[in-house]
Image: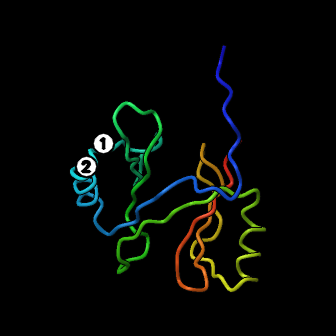
Amino acid sequence: MSKKVAAPQPSRFCWNELVTPNVPAAKQFYAGLFGWKTRPFGKDAVGYTLFKTGKDPRAAGGVMKCPKPGKTAQWIPYVFVGNVDSTLKKAIKLGGKIAAPPFVVPTVGRIAVLVDPQGATIGVLKPEM
């Protein structure tokens, strides 16, 4: 009998991602701090690494090279949403800005990153079902 997996709950934090100019240094730091192991994500494994904890099949988060040169490292938390586009429209109406327009990550879902009116970065994710 297979275990039924609960559907993601909208408005809940679901992922943490580190964007950094120095991925090898970040991997070394978090491996030393928390004992995290790293594993490339996806078949092509181009530029994205998962942080793993022990034998837990779930990843603790991910790390990638910052796509914008000159930016400092930062953690970006992601929140599940029912619709990425409507969430971005609502964010803009409330004074937010789009930092990364929507894009699809195969086997993961549709993602976008926004900045709130105070300057904090947050990602939104509509999971692939």
Splitting the image into 4 quarters, where does residue 30 fall?
Answer: bottom left
Residue 70 placed where, x, y %? 35, 81
Mark 2 secondary-structure assignment: helix
For this view, does 66 lie left or right of residue 4? left
Task: Give the mark nearest the N terminus, 2 or 1.
Answer: 2
Splitting the image into 4 quarters, where does residue 83 fall?
Answer: bottom right
Name the amino acid type tagged 2.
Ala
Residue 96 placed where, x, y %? 65, 82
Q: Can you identify the residue that label 1 sits on?
A: 37
For this view, does 1 lie left or right of residue 64? right
Query: Is label 2 in contact with label 1 (beta carbons under 8 Å)?
Result: yes
- Density class for disc 1 (Cα within 10 Å; few <14, some 14-19, many ≥20) is some
- The label shown at residue 31 is 2
* Rendered residue at 70%/77% (across/down): 91
Q: Is residue 7 above or below residue 12?
A: above
Name the amino acid type tagged 1.
Lys
* Rendered residue at 43%/70% (across/down): 67
* Rendered residue at 70%/49% (across/down): 9
The quadrant in which the C terminus is found is: top right
